[in-house]
Image (cartoon, rainbow, N blue to C red):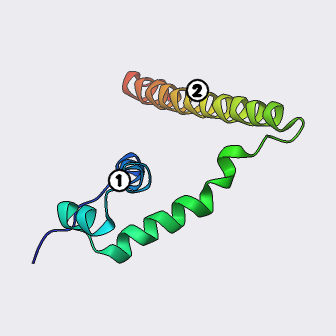
């Protein structure tokens, strides 16, 4: 039994491009890559179903909201990291006080 090969999204696009632009037959690609034709056609179907997104323009204000959301997520991550550091420092502080007999 042959081992399944995982193809990255970039590899899949390159394979589809070879067929669509360079006119390499599907059978040749499948034989070369060791994939089944139904796998190739599934990639092609997914590619065309999602291609519309490339040409869509962001709605007015959407880009601003996206930037704001990314900034909020980054700040939340930073706050989480600070909270973890503070908790660790407090734990060390309490342990040190216990060692010194202050608690």
Query: Count the marks: how many?
Result: 2
Comparing labels 2 and 1, the label whose residue is closer to the camera: 1
88 and 24: which is toward the camera: 24
Residue bearing mark 1: 15
Indicate the quadrant where residue 71 lies: top right
Q: Position of residue 74 (x, y in %)?
A: 64, 30
Tell me the crowding category of disc 1: few under 14, some 14 to 19, or many 20 or more residues within 10 angstroms, Cα based. Answer: many
Q: What residue occupies the far right of the structure in this picture? A: 60
In the figure, is residue 89 to the left or right of 55? left
Indicate the quadrant where residue 1 lies: bottom left
First along the sequence among labels 2 and 1: 1
Q: Position of residue 46 (x, y in %)?
A: 53, 64
Indicate the quadrant where residue 67 lies: top right
Q: What residue occupies the far front of the structure in this picture? A: 23
13 and 1: which is toward the camera: 13
Residue at 78% across, 31% down: 68
77 and 43: which is toward the camera: 43
SS state under label 1: helix
In the figure, is residue 15 to the left or right of 76? left
Tell me the crowding category of disc 2: few under 14, some 14 to 19, or many 20 or more residues within 10 angstroms, Cα based. Answer: few
Q: What residue occupies the far left of the structure in this picture? A: 1
Q: Is 86 above or below relative to 12? A: above
Q: Is 9 above or below relative to 102? A: below
| Whole-number angstrom distance, CA of label 2 to CA of label 1 | 45 Å
Residue at 39% across, 21% down: 100
Q: Position of residue 11 (x, y in %)?
A: 34, 49
Numbered circle sitting on residue 67: none
SS state under label 2: helix
Residue bearing mark 2: 82
């Amino acid at each position: 039994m042959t081992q399944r090969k995982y193809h990255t999204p970039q590899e899949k696009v390159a394979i589809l491009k070879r067929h669509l632009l360079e006119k390499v037959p599907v059978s040749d690609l499948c034989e070369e890559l060791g994939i089944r034709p139904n796998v190739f056609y599934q990639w092609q179907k997914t590619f065309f179903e999602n291609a519309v997104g490339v040409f869509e323009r962001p709605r007015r204000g959407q880009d601003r909201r996206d930037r704001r959301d990314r900034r909020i997520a980054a700040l939340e991550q930073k706050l989480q990291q600070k909270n973890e550091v503070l908790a660790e420092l407090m734990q060390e502080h309490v342990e040190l006080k216990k060692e010194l007999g202050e608690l």
